Image (cartoon, helix red, strand yellow):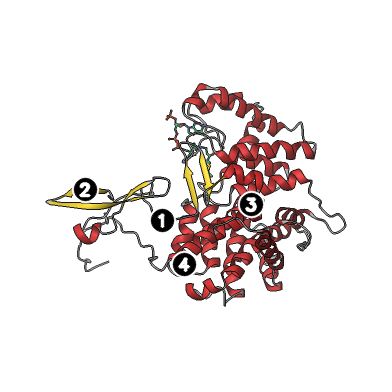
Amino acid sequence: MSKTATLKIDDQELELPVIVGSEGEKAVDVRKLRATTGYITYDEGFGNTGSCQSEITYIDGEVGILRYRGYPIEQLSEKCSFVEVAYLVIYGELPTVEQRERFSAALTEQAPLRAGMERFIQNFPRDAHPMAVLSSSLNALGAYYPNIASNNHKRDLEHFDEAAAIALSKVRTIAAHTYRVNNGLPLNYPKKDLGYSENFLHLMFSAPYDEYVATPEVAAAINFFFLLHAEHEQNCSTSIVRMVASAGANLFASAAAGVNALWGPLHGGANQAVLEMLNAIHADGDDGSKFIEAAKNGKARLMGFGHRVYKNYDPRAKIIKGSFDKALDSLGITDDSLLDIARNLEAAALSDDYFISRKLYPNVDFYSGLIMNALKIPVEMFTVMFAIGRMPGWIAQWHEVASNPKAKINRPRQIYVGPVPRDVPDVV
Ligand code: ACO
């Protein structure tokens, strides 16, 4: 028998249906509440609100579980590439060999930008923030592919495979071109024989007579970074992607909105904050111990530690740390003052009761900031890297909304607390 919850309000008693997810997550269904009682629920920040039913990602933060389409992140990162995981997130199943080849070929075909798009990026000021360029450029894709971005979900879904390949492949090219333009460097063009992450590194770092060849360990570290960021259910940017999609907007417009949300320092900016913290500790002549004491006394916050959702261990942190150590070895980086400080902070926090008792473990941002710094990716590109990795999730979430015949435009209510009705005075 299906469960219900009983709500007593005024002199009314209401039976509210209970929805149970495939992992046993429970929700009280309040969809008929306002129509029946005139009341709405109040949940600023949406911490207790399920905005959708989704088949894409499952997270149990208490235990440290992250699964894409039912597959644990640990197994995916061991057995699959970012491109295979992107396919899984977008299409629901891991690709067969043939599907994988077709998908890779589509990504290769879509990697270059149209000449007009290149000029669009080149026309931004040299000091433009790469996230501003990225969101504008993703939006501009809608202008270059009007058939695919028609803002008619039925029609846009007929071109979904192409739209997904364009978004996933071009986000990487846009990001790398922006870096080159901002640094006054000539653009590089994607190469057919390189994988997704290797191509990204080539687009970023190859010089006209000096092609950048990533070590397998460095390419693997970037691959892990993208893979671990591929999807994270209804966080701020993903919720925005779904909200924009719920109005009928096309994939590129919806993904551009996601980039804007991710740009906010409370969302995608934590890996940048880690590096800024390490630089400040270094500038202070501290080896990390003074900072740890300040964090324990509430005078500082150890960036890259703790997580809103993961109250055990961020499963992504463990995976990225392993690949990080290998990448550093392959680059021959052994003595680096920021790295030493990071290792001191990590060791101190993992053995200190203040951090242990509050379940403050290193999160994925702690290591990813360090990896990108070691690979000479500038700090202002960190959030862009996050956006490249998150693109499969945004595509999948857009598709879930666009293909749901029962999807409704998202339109929360509010409690009005402004002035009560009054008359406009004669003299203003
Ligand atoms: N350093 C020192 N103390 C901390 C830290 C930290 N990083 N994080 C939490 N605490 C302490 C708090 O002061 C509090 O102590 P108290 O119980 O003595 O008052 C206790 O731990 C609980 O803290 P909350 O803020 O309630 O934890 P919450 O779950 O709300 O916050 C958050 C999680 C925001 C991520 C926090 O841990 C933090 O600010 N971390 C650093 C920033 C960071 O790395 N953010 C990235 C998260 S990953 C992501 O979003 C992609």
Q: Residue at x 77, y 55 (%)?
A: 202
Q: Is residue 421 left or right of residue 245?
A: left
Relative depth, front residue between 383 and 235: 235
Relative depth, front residue between 335 and 277: 335
Q: Earlier in the sequence, mark 2 or mark 1?
A: 2
- Residue 403 circle label: 4
Q: Earlier in the sequence, mark 3 or mark 4?
A: 3
Residue 244: where, in percent of width, then height? Answer: 46, 64
Q: Which residue is mark 1?
A: 53
Q: Quadrant of residue 375?
A: top right
Q: Residue at x 24, y 59 (%)?
A: 34
Disc 2 vs disc 3: which is toward the camera? 2
Q: Which residue type carries mark 2?
A: Thr
Q: Compute the Cα span from label 3 to label 4.
A: 28 Å
Given the current orientation, which residue lies at the most extreme bottom position?
Answer: 147
Q: Compute the Cα span from label 1 to label 4.
A: 13 Å
Q: Earlier in the sequence, mark 3 or mark 1?
A: 1
Q: Which residue type carries mark 3?
A: Met
CB under 8 Å between discs 2 and 3: no
Q: Is residue 10 above or below residue 244?
A: above
Residue 379 seen in render: no
CB under 8 Å between discs 2 and 4: no
Q: Which residue is mark 3?
A: 385
